[in-house]
Amino acid sequence: MAEHNELGKAGESAAVAHLKRNGYEILHTNWRQGHFELDIVAKTADELVIIEVKTRSKGSVTCPEDAVTNSKIRNIVSAADVYIKSFDIDLPARFDIISVIWKSPDFEIEHIEDAFYPPVNVLRR
């Protein structure tokens, strides 16, 4: 497996551990259905939380969260719609980003709640 893929998996594991430490219930990681994918789906007492994880090494030119483009946001929102309908979930949803930076030997984690809102007319299948 390529080194960047291993770093991404380690970053997602660090993000899951961070969420659990902060009281989130993890429903799914790397959920897929067809071409739809969500990194982490979690739940608080009153919200469904869709989390996009972006991992980079220390010294990277760009911030991890900058990799969440408008196109990526549309894909995440469409996937969340499929997820919510598939599991018949009746909770408000929120979209977060977890930025993970590898600083040997640990990860620096920034959890950005309500990182983006679903754009209007995004749902396409």
Image (tube, helix red, strand yellow):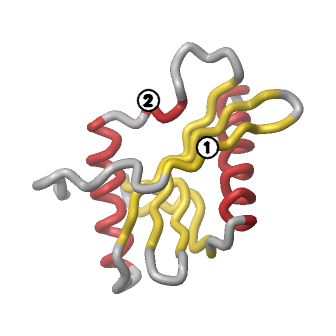
Q: Amino acid at mark 2?
A: Asp
Question: Is residue 47 positioned above or below 14 on the image?
Answer: below
Quadrant (top left/top right/bottom left/bottom right) for the C terminus: bottom left
Q: Residue at x 57, y 68 (%)?
A: 28
Q: Residue at x 34, y 59 (%)?
A: 79
Mark 1 or 2: in front is 1
Q: Element under label 2?
A: helix
Q: Which mark is residue 94?
A: none
Residue pointed to by mark 2 = 66
Q: Quadrant of residue 72?
A: top left
Say left or right for 40 vs 22.
left
Q: Position of residue 32 (x, y in %)?
A: 47, 60
Query: How many numbered tags mark residues here?
Result: 2
Question: Is residue 70 positioned above or below 49 on the image?
Answer: above
Say left or right for 78 vs 38.
left
* Residue placed most toward the observer, 38 or 106: 106
* Residue placed most toward the observer, 82 or 11: 11
Residue pointed to by mark 1 = 110
- Classify mark 1: residues with Cα within 10 Å, few (<14), some (14-19) or many (20+): some
Q: Position of residue 44 (x, y in %)?
A: 54, 76
Quadrant (top left/top right/bottom left/bottom right) for the N terminus: top right
Q: Position of residue 124 (x, y in %)?
A: 17, 55
